[in-house]
Image (tube, grey):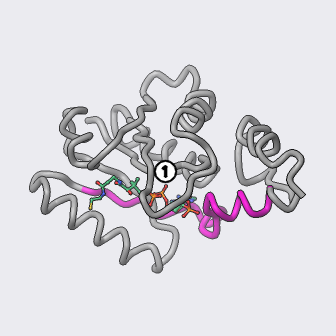
Amino acid sequence: MKVIYPGSFDPITNGHIDIINRSCLLFDSVVIGVSKNKSKNHLFTLEERKEMIDEVFRGRKNIIVKIFDGLLYKFCEEENTNCIIRGLRAISDYEYELQMAMANKSLKADLETFFLVSNNKYSFLSSSLVKEIAYYGGSIDNLVPDNVKKLLFNKYKGVE
Ligand code: COA
């Protein structure tokens, strides 16, 4: 079975990667759906985000990275699957995730959202947190892969 892991991934972090690797043990293939979140100002373009994720999973044949625009349920239809996976880091994620899962189900009744509990190591992690630490020059070595670290460093180069 194929599952969609949707998100804005601005940028992808080790927390997302943990969810993706664990999803691979449960599903035949994982499509990482990179999209914009209308309520966020993104640092990286969609193409930059896709490229950095492609690099992280290069050689992994059961992981495909795609950009999608518009509603998630339509992307699921295009991909011919009714499975979505999301990570839950803390109880505070639950309300938003539940709302999204129910909204998606109201749009397409056979859509199922699966939740994986985040690894303890990454339960505090978010893309915004990584960006903030990188912006102020702190170490993000254990939070993102090397290629993402370099890209963040380049974005913030010269920023006072
Ligand atoms: N480890 C680390 N961080 C995690 C995480 C994990 N396991 N799970 C979530 N996060 C973080 C993300 O880094 C992100 O942090 P940020 O807020 O600092 O950027 C935050 O939690 C949640 O972001 P993400 O998981 O990327 O999702 P999102 O909420 O930004 O994106 C979409 C949500 C794109 C999936 C959603 O907006 C969508 O489906 N859009 C299409 C339109 C649609 O169909 N809407 C729903 C129907 S109404």
Q: Tell me the quarter of the image containing the C terminus.
A: bottom right
Q: Tell me the quarter of the image containing the N terminus.
A: top left
Please report the residue visible at 36 percent of the width from the left and 68 percent of the height from the top: 97
Q: Is residue 152 above or below residue 79?
A: below
Residue type at mark 1?
Ser
Residue 158: give x, y in percent of width and height: 89, 47
Please report the residue visible at 12 percent of the width from the left and 53 percent of the height from the top: 108
Q: Is residue 17 above or below residue 58?
A: below
Residue 79: give x, y in percent of width and height: 25, 33
Left/right of residue 91 with respect to residue 129 in the rendered view: left
Beta carbon at label 1 within 8 Å of ligand 1: yes
Residue 147 or residue 151, whichever sits in front:
151
Please report the residue visible at 59 percent of the width from the left and 47 percent of the height from the top: 12
SS type, badge 1: loop
Please report the residue visible at 44 percent of the width from the left and 56 percent of the height from the top: 37
Left/right of residue 118 with respect to residue 75 in the rendered view: right
Quarter assignment of residue 143: bottom right
User: Circle 1 sits on which residue?
Assistant: 8
What residue span does the magenta drawing correspond to?
113-134
Residue 34: give x, y in percent of width and height: 45, 42
> Farthest left residue?
109
Left/right of residue 68 with respect to residue 157 in the rendered view: left
